[in-house]
Each structure stands twice: as C-alpha cells, then as structure tokens.
Amino acid sequence: MTRLTADIRSTFTADGAEPFTVDAALEVESNETCVVLGPSGSGKTLLLETIAGFHEHTGVVTANGTDITGQPPEERGFGFVFQDYALFPHMTVRENVEYGTRYRESSRDAAELLAELGVAHLSERNPPTLSGGEKQRVALARALAIRPSVMLLDEPLAALDVPTQQALRDDLVDVLADVTAVYVTHNRTTARAVADRIVVMQDGRVVQRGTPEDVFERPASPMVARFTGANVIDLSAAPSLRRILDDDIGSQARSDGSGRGPVDRDSGTDAADHVAIRPEAITLNDADGDLSATVERVVREDATSRVTLAFDDVTVEAFATSPPVVGTEVALSFPRDRLHPC
Amino acid sequence: MATETERRFEIAAVGRTPLVVAFVVVQALAFAAAYSVGQPTWYAYFIVGSTAVTAYALDGTSFTVATATAGSLLMVALGLPLFMFVARQTPALVIEKALDPDVHRVLYLGVYGPLLAALLSLLFGVPLAHLLAKGFSGQPLVESLVDLPLVVPHSVAGIIILFGFGKGGAFPQFSVLGTMVGLVLAMAFVSAPYAVNASREAFEAIDDRLEYASRIHGANNWETFRRVTGPLAVRGMITGGVLAWARAVSEFGAVAVVAYSVEFFYPFAGGTVTAQHAPVFVYNTYLQGGLEESGAVAFLLLAVSAVIFLLVRYLTDDGTAGGMP
C-alpha cells in the first residue's frame, strides 16, 4: 500500500547526446497503475529510471509522504521490469528470481512465482536460451519476488511478438491489480488495458493527465489525439463539418440560452480549430448522416475493417463491420458528445 | 564448375579443424623440405602462393585472395624468422642450457616477476578500469596517463621510475634500484595499460541495465560488483592479466635500467639468489657468447612463455572466440 509521487525537474546529459530536460510530475495512489504514455524520445524511460533512483536529479520523489529522493535504488524497495529484460546471463532462471530475496526481510518463493507465471519448467535454464516472452516472465518474477512496494515497468511488452504481448498483457493486468505501479509505454492498446490513470508525455513534459477515458475521449491537443488513435479534424479544411457544428451551437443557444454547444463544453471556446473524435465513434450509414464522404481505403482487421474516408479536404478513419466499397459515397454521423475540441 | 553453395557445402562436409590441421602440416613439410635443401627462401614464396591458392579454394573472390595474399607477406616477415630460429637450434646446446642452474633461476624469475607485475596491475588496474568505464570528469587526463607507457620508450620509462622511486625520489629512505620491487615496478609500469584497457573494455561491454537491475532489487554497489559486474567482466580481467604478464615477460628496456640484476627468494635453493630478468640475460649472453648460445637460452624462454600462454588461453577459453577452431 504505497502512494508514490514524483516531481522531476532536471536536465540530463548522456555521453555524446544533447542535454535533455525532464519536467514532469506524477501522483500514483496506492495499488493504482499509472501509465506514462508517449512517443519515443519523450523522456518517459528517463522519468521512470529517475523514480527508481538510477539518475541524480533536482526533484522530489516521495513514497507514502516520505522523501526518498536521496535514497539509493537498493533502499527504495521498488521492483523494475526492463524492456530488454536485463536478466543476469551468468545465472540460472531460479538464481535470477532469487537474486533480490536475500536483501529483503519478506520475499516470495521463486518456484511458486515461476509456476504462477507458467515458466516453472525453465528454472535451471540460463536466460540466453529463453525466448523473449519467457525472459520477460522471468524478469517479472524477479521483480515480484522481493514483494516490491512499487512496480516500475519500462515497455515490458515492446520487444515481444503480438501473440506473446497479448498473453503477457493479460498476466500483467492480474499482477498489477494489487500493487502501486508506474508503467511506461508508447502502445495505446497496452495503456488502455492496464491504466487506472494516464500521463501523456512529449519532449520531457506532461501534456495531459487523467483517466484513460479523459485521455482517449478528450485529448488535450492534436498530438495527444493522434497518439491515442483519434481522428483530428482541422475545421478550416472541413467547412461542411464546421457548418453542422455551428448550427448545433446556434440551436442549443436558442434552446437553453447558454450560447454554447456540446463540442466546446470543456474548452469554453466556440471557435476551436481542431476537433478530435475516435474512429469507433463515427458511424457509417447508407442513407442519413451528418455529411457524405468518399471511401478511400478499407483495411481488414480482426473482426472489423478500418475505413479511410474523405470529405472536404480532410480524411478520417472509422470502423465498419460490413466494409463499404472503395470509391463509393457513404453517410457519416458524428455523435456530438464524442467530438472534442483540441 | 562448383557454385558458391557447392563450395561452402564441401567445406562444411570436411570441417574446419581438418582443414586447418592439413594447412599447418603442409606448411611444416614445405618448410622442412626447403630448409633441408638449403633454400629457405623457397618457403617464403610457398607461403604466399599456398595462401593465395587456399583463399581462392575456400572463397573464390578476388578481394579475399588479395587480402589473404597481402596478409601472408606479413606472415612471412613475422613467421619465417621464427621458423628459422627454431630450425637452427643446436639440440645439445639447448639441453645443456636447460640443465644449467643459472638458466633455471633466470627462467623462474622470468615467469615469477611478470606474474607479480600482472597481479599488481590487476589489483589496482581493475578498480581504475571500472571507474574509466563509468566515466568521470577529468577522465581524458587519466586515460592519457594510463596509456603513456605505450608510447614512452621503455628505457625512458626506467629512468622515470628511478626519478620517482630511486635514490632521492618520492621515498628518500628507499630506492628501487636493483631490487625485486624495482623489477616488478618497472614491469608493471609498462604492462599495466594492458590490464587496465582489457578490463575496461570488459566493463564497458556490460549493459548498464544489469547493474540497475541488481541495485533496484536490493544489492548495493559492492554486492553488485561481486555478483554481477565482476563475474561478467572476469574474462576481460584474465585477458588483461595475461597480456600484462606477456608484456612483462618481454620487457627489457625499463628492467635493464631499474633492476639489471636482482636478489630474490628462490624456493628451489631454499634461499635468496641473484639473477637477471630473462631478456636481459639473453642480451648479456648474446654479447658474451654470441648468437648460438643466446639463441639456446632464448629458445627455452620462448618455449616456457608459449606453454604458459597456451595453458592460460586453454583454461580461459569459453569456445566463443571466432577464427581458429
């Protein structure tokens, strides 16, 4: 039961690299999973490593209100799962998992953990002989063996193939349910699956924080919208959509006297340049809709198709269970409560 | 005409070890034949020609043939004198020297002194190598100092040591001139860079994240070094130690200046004896007894060094090195 806060404001310099400034704050409640989401080079791994105590910094990290900024990593009681596993190659799987147990008063049984994660049969093997998924399960077991107060995970699924990612992601959801965790990823699917709250980073700064719904449905900027997979529509290039939205604002203003429409409910501006909407929110109809669009491309995905549609000077993506024919006209509906200015 | 695939298949079918053994045997026979007819020059031509033919047979590209041929010219320059040196030994003289107690002392000192120098280089060089691998401010200055012995003429190194630790040096009451300490110091001065640099490369090759993983799971710096960094770098340290030892065995200049002749404990005599470091002894024998006599002592030193070197290589080889099987 650990509440973690971190407020990092530091410039880091690696050999031969440009100095990089991280200016980011996190607050993670007990047993909550905070996902740090951002593109490569946004500083999310650096932030995680700084929370772990690997880098000196000018900032403050607290655990349950106690300032642990000056504590070395070995005294923090955290677990860490690395993207590239970082298993000790000269030790067996069992020795890897037991590595930290001698330093902790309370620890978990290595054999039991390996069995829970489905890799008990590998206990006497050496890490270089394991597959990526097996290695990451062992790395997860090693971190869990010390009963960490906080789990720090740096893109643990990034180096794995898709089926292994899905299987391990399911395990992670279970594992992270009852531990405070900070999970760094650039994968929005993973973020949505494991997050209780999300912090989006860009260029070393936090650009949005909130629940998964906040971030995915109400992105704070076009960058966040694009990164989370939403359509970003430039209204200056989509006059037909702007007209519809203006009409909505007008009619709502007339009905409630507020002068504000549904689209600008959060931003408080009537003149947003961009609106974001998730692909799954847009519906395709044969006849009635807000406007007409041309089908430009259809890509089959698992149980549905991703359809690229063009209207005015913009394109948007939507999902359809029965894909339309490329080149045909379809009617699009934009649920007003899913449109968000950004 | 064989295609590339067929050629590779043929090599795979034969195996690399028999090929290498066959090549060495053919070379030895060719040298023996050329030497026995008094025409060792013919063997020089044979090395170049046989290497080019072998390269063509194994690879077939003009690039490989050209590089192998150019490389074989260097091998002639390095290898032919060695072959001639071995071939021209007088067995009776070698046996006589091998039974000479003075030579025993020289050979003992020639192995034991460098061993102390290598251990000294590792004892203080490994911590320095770890620091250099991690990086610190002022590092280029320290790096230059570490590498200085590689470029300083070794007789100059000897003079520098005497200025530092000889009469009137840093410890006025103690002089290393003509002592075992001086001998080891002179050897360590010229061999430490090998121990430091090999260890440093080994530390640099270790992913920082392994150390992070060790620390975050509870191990402090000392424990991390003992359980992770040290074991992963140990092969590099041994390589550094062997290189330092080999360099110290061959050291002449600095030793001749600092410790021309030293007194040391010789266990086979049960007391202290006086002897010279092997290269100095070989040089003295050459000046006093000529090429043949000094060659016999040099041959013994070469044989002892080669046996120890191969033994260490064998003991530390994990089978991952490329090249020769």
Image: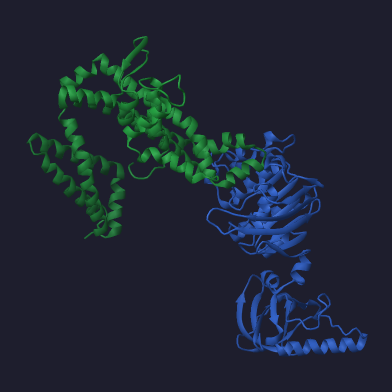
Chain colours: A blue, B green
Quadrant of the rendering where the C terminus of chain B is positioned: top left
Q: Is residue A154 above or below residue A281?
A: above
Q: Quadrant of residue A340?
A: bottom right
Q: Quadrant of residue A271?
A: bottom right
Q: Is residue B128 above or below residue A19?
A: above
- Tell whether B21 sits left or right of A166: left
Q: Is residue A23 above or below residue B108?
A: below
Which residue appears at 45% of the width and 19% of the height?
B173
Percent position (x, y) of residue B87? 16, 31
Instruction: Report if residue B64 is visible in the image.
Output: yes
Q: Is residue A324 above or below residue B51?
A: below
Percent position (x, y) of residue A309? 65, 83
Residue placed farthest to the right in the image?
Answer: A256
Percent position (x, y) of residue A57? 68, 50
Instruction: Report if residue A114 is visible in the image.
Output: no
Residue placed farthest to the top in the image?
Answer: B270
**The one of B37 and A206 positioned closer to us in this rendering:** A206
Residue placed farthest to the left in the image?
Answer: B37
- Tell whether B194 sits left or right of B300: right
**The one of B97 and B214 positioned closer to us in this rendering:** B97
Which residue appears at 34% of the width and 34% of the height?
B156
Which residue appears at 18% of the width and 45% of the height?
B47
Quadrant of the rendering where the N terminus of chain B is positioned: bottom left
Percent position (x, y) of residue A187? 65, 63
- Tell whether B323 sits left or right of A272: left
**The one of B138 and B73 positioned closer to us in this rendering:** B138
Q: How many marks?
A: 0
